[in-house]
């Protein structure tokens, strides 16, 4: 068993429309909250466990290349989420029902994945990707 120097990665998003984003990620991607934090002062947070986490660090040229493949032009800011899902088309449909904006229809990447690009209600760019059977998940 391999041990990693970092046991878990968490990304914390601060949003003005908390309920809308919780619904977007929970219902749109089918994620059950692992923990809910509610304080008397009205502060709230939710912990969503998403399985394995990977941190990708791109230089500008590589980010532009990925945007070109997925969208056809440079659109991403400094951050973009990428979620591996079992069915890209179904996930796109669910997220659109929960407030996502379609940036680009699914495309087959040079590495064989099916990727779709959306924008979450808070403006964050999201890639959904499906790894077909027999293709390296990278």
Image: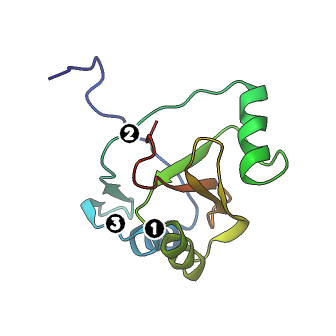
Q: Separation of disc 3 and disc 1 at Cα?
A: 15 Å
Residue that lies at the very extreme toward the bottom in this rendered image: 97
Question: Disc 3 or disc 1, which is closer to the eye?
Answer: 1
Q: Residues within 10 Å of mark 1 (few under 14, many from 20)?
A: some
Q: Assign a secondary structure to mark 3.
A: loop
Residue ID at (71%, 24%)? 59
Residue that lies at the very extreme toward the front in this rendered image: 134
**Disc 3 or 1, which lies upstream in sequence?**
3
**Disc 2 or 1, which lies upstream in sequence?**
2
Residue 25 pos. (x, y %): 45, 66
Q: Which mark is residue 31?
A: 3
Count of labels in the image: 3
Q: Assign a secondary structure to mark 2.
A: loop
Residue ID at (83%, 52%)? 72
Would you say the residues marked 3 and 2 are in contact, meaning their CB atoms lie under 8 Å apart? no
Residue ID at (45%, 45%)? 135
Q: Separation of disc 2 and disc 1 at Cα?
A: 19 Å
Which residue corresponds to mark 1? 87
Q: Residues within 10 Å of mark 2 (few under 14, many from 20)?
A: few
Residue ID at (49%, 70%)? 91
Residue that lies at the very extreme toward the right in this rendered image: 73
**Residue 75 in sight from this viewpoint:** yes
Q: Which mark is residue 53?
A: 2
Q: Assign a secondary structure to mark 1.
A: loop
Left or right: 53, with 79 as reference point: left
């Amino acid at each position: 068993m391999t041990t990693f120097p970092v046991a878990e990665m968490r990304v914390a998003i601060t949003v003005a429309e908390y309920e809308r984003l919780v619904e977007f990620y929970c219902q749109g991607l089918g994620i059950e909250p692992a923990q809910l934090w509610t304080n008397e002062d009205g502060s709230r947070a939710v912990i969503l466990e998403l399985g394995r986490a990977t941190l990708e660090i791109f230089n500008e040229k590589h980010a532009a290349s990925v945007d070109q493949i997925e969208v056809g032009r440079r659109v991403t800011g400094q951050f973009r989420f990428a979620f591996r899902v079992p069915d890209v088309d179904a996930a796109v449909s669910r997220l659109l029902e929960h407030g996502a904006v379609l940036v680009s229809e699914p495309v087959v990447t040079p590495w064989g994945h099916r990727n779709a690009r959306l924008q979450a209600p808070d403006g964050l760019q999201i890639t959904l990707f499906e790894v077909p059977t027999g293709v390296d998940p990278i």
